[in-house]
Image: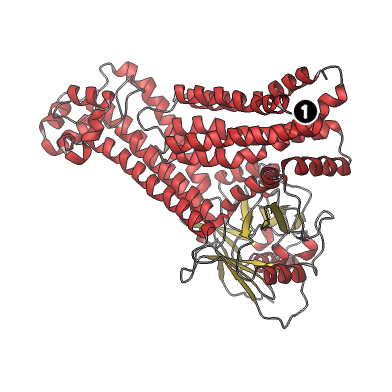
Amino acid sequence: MSVSIVEKVYRYPWRRRWWLATIGNLLVIASLLIAAYQILRGVVAASEPLAPWLRRTPWLRPLYDGLSPLPRDLSLWFPEALGMLLWAAVGLFIALILLNALPAIRTSARGLLVEFAGGWLPVAWEDVQQIHVTGDEAGQRFVLLVIPAKQAKRLTGWHRVYGLLYGTTIQPAFLVSSSIDEFDHLLNTISHENSRAIRSVEGAQPVLVDEQRRSPLFGLFLRGATTASPAANAILPPTTAPDVTATLPTWSLIRIAHLSVMALVLIFGLLHYRSYWDRALTLMVPELRSNPALLWVSQDPVYRAIFNAYQGASTPFFGFSGRPDLPAPVWLLIAAHLLLALVIALAFALLIAIPSSAIAGQNGMIVRFLPHPLTFARTLPWASISAFQVIDLGFGRSIAFVKSPALPWLSRLCGLVVTGQWTPGVILIGTMKNWPELIERCAERLSHLPSINDAPRFQPAAFMPNLQLIGQPVATIVALKAELAATGATTTHLLWQSVRTMLVVSLPLGLMFAILALIDGDRWPDLGIILGGVGFGLAGLLEWPLVVLISLIIHGALDNDQEQAHIFTFYPLVQMPRLLPLLLALICLIINLPWLAAILWLASLAIAYWVTAALWVDVYKWEGAQVILGGLLPAIWQLFVMVGFWLLR
């Protein structure tokens, strides 16, 4: 007797797949434009009457200018065109993989229907053979690979790519993520219907759910979840206490400064975005070059020379052949939208770093990122909060850092600044109204949940050296030494941890060069972007051994191996407070505020002096001139790096 089930379609929320769709569609558009451009150049060059006709026809003249200069020798053009067409094919292939990576799935009485390229591919229930499972440490997020039997032959050859990406098979398969609507219901339906279908098939085996065949790639993406699986379905005891609402005062300095910085990034970012359009339009439309609002473009010597050479004519849309150092309208427009995407992402990251209010209720906490009546909030179930850390900053000020994977992805930037780790989190300011009541409610609710890695979820006096080094440098260094000693970690492990920390501190230096060179619309990007970014990153990294060795020479401790290892371990850890001003300087460079970036960079040098001097006071017991000289060592090195950056820029 057959049992029919109601057809149901399971789809991914748009917020989960928009980036795949955006990148995939951009790749399709770019690939088709590249292919069409190369083919048209060849066709026009091969047809003698076509080029003069395009040049004489007014409404087709821009097309002719865009295709110019035409190839004179088709035998030389063919290898170039073939290479570009191959790149276009690669782009289309990657787009196909991305656009179909998270397919909608439809269930019916006969089996599954998997969406692919606008159609549906059937997979019978009895043909579902294996499901490979990769999950996070919390047991809350999963990526599954569903593998039909070989004899089914329902999926396409393209689906072998998903098995290869997953890293466990070369058979055709498709991916299912836990972010799909009603994920648990879909898995239960597959298991139940597969068990029912195989009863009528002799020798058929039920679907094998293999949790040992983990994907190295997706396991890397899922690493770092912070909630523990025992608490995923924890039921907290009910409480009759009313919800606690903590809000930043309307005219508080923190709130005004926070929203002002975000608005500054948006306003100057959009103004800089418009400058790209100004340059592209003056290159493409000669009549606009005399427009008073666009006269600033001709003040640039490069653009003035181009305008003089192309008086009354538009420049080639794809740039000048053999001159990647000259501006091209197409790259100006691409760079403009790369800049726009960066500005929006950075403004959003700044916005969500400090919520304007928090509501602690019975089942979770609601953090609001915009003041009332604007509604932009995120609900954090208590079980999803891995840590609520109250941090004493000194000077009678305190904040709380809330870590939860339920926060927006870009909140990881805030987590990087506060903890030095790529973890999602937000900062609650201690000047909020009803702050003591909020802390009390969070402590009570989180006390019912199990600890994570032996660390309680609520920490009323958390140690956060990245922030506390500014106000209490010597005391924080002493506490940091005690904490590292308590862990019992080996010197080798601590040194590797220090390497990772110094890489994070040096990262903004490399990004300053690489990102600015990438979004510089006045020249095509090249390998120099990567080399320059790596070079400045290494320059920042070189500060670590250089400064430590000079300090050991001054102190006369070159023969003491234990002392050397001790200093090498601690130096990167105390430099983390520099990360915030360096990241802010990077943002200022992106939105074209170099003078403000220079001020913030100098502020990072002051912080380097402050924390390094405190380090020498603790480990070497230096005083007076020795402390001043020792504190100046990293500042002087970074000053050289800064001058080199501005000269190359």
* Quarter assignment of residue 146: bottom right
Vertical relation: 265 (above or below) 403: above
At 75% across and 80% down in the image, what residue appears? Answer: 238
170 left or right of 36 in image:
right
Residue 157: x %, y % from top left? 56, 44
* 22 or 241, nearer to the observer: 241
At 29% across and 19% down in the image, what residue appears? Answer: 74
* Crowding near the residue tagged with mark 1, few <14, some 14–19, many ≥20 C-alpha atoms within 10 Å: some
At 56% across and 40% down in the image, what residue appears? Answer: 581
Residue labelled with disc 1: 622
In the rendered image, the quadrant that contains the C terminus is top left
Amino acid tagged 1: Trp
* 313 or 621, nearer to the observer: 621
470 left or right of 93 in image:
right
In the rendered image, the quadrant that contains the N terminus is bottom right
* 593 or 320, nearer to the observer: 593
Residue 9: x %, y % from top left? 55, 67
